[in-house]
Image (spheres, rainbow, N blue to C red):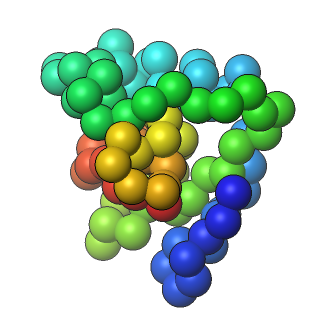
């Protein structure tokens, strides 16, 4: 896993169990997220731990959890668990 500098240094990491639970909870509560992830991501490799980033949205206290690999870019696709609800590439 790599970061591309500046704002995108990882904040912490989480276990695969925590990551998948976080994404499952987000998919359950956000309309359309499951479809978005199905369309825009490919499945992750097996890893024991994943990076977590702080959400860059001003005023949003959320953390970004890895949801999959971005389908068309060499990046991971992350979902904010905070108030902005945005997705990003990392
Ligand atoms: Zn956010």
User: Of residues 5 and 64, which is closer to you in this image?
Assistant: 5
Q: Is residue 39 visible?
A: yes
Position above or below: 90 against 5: above
Q: Is residue 30 visible?
A: no
Expressed as whole percent of the image width and height from the top left, the position of residue 5 reads 57, 83
Q: What residue occupies the far top of the structure in this picture? A: 28
Position above or below: 23 against 58: above
Looking at the rendering, in which quadrant would you find the N terminus? bottom right
Q: 36 left or right of 68?
A: left
Q: Quadrant of residue 50?
A: top right
Q: What residue occupies the far left of the structure in this picture? A: 32
Expressed as whole percent of the image width and height from the top left, the position of residue 67 reads 48, 34
Q: Quadrant of residue 71?
A: top left
Expressed as whole percent of the image width and height from the top left, the position of residue 9 reads 62, 73
Count up the numbered dots: 0
Look at 44% across and 31% down and name the residue there: 42
Q: 18 left or right of 60?
A: right
Position above or below: 74 against 85: below
């Amino acid at each position: 896993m790599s970061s591309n500098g500046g704002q995108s240094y990882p904040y912490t990491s989480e276990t695969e169990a925590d990551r998948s639970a976080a994404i499952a909870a987000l998919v359950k509560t956000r309309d359309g997220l499951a479809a978005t992830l199905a369309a825009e991501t490919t499945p992750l490799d097996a890893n024991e731990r994943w990076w977590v980033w702080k959400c860059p949205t001003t005023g949003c206290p959320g953390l970004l959890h890895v949801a999959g690999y971005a389908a068309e870019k060499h990046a991971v696709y992350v979902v904010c668990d905070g108030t902005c609800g945005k997705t990003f590439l990392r």
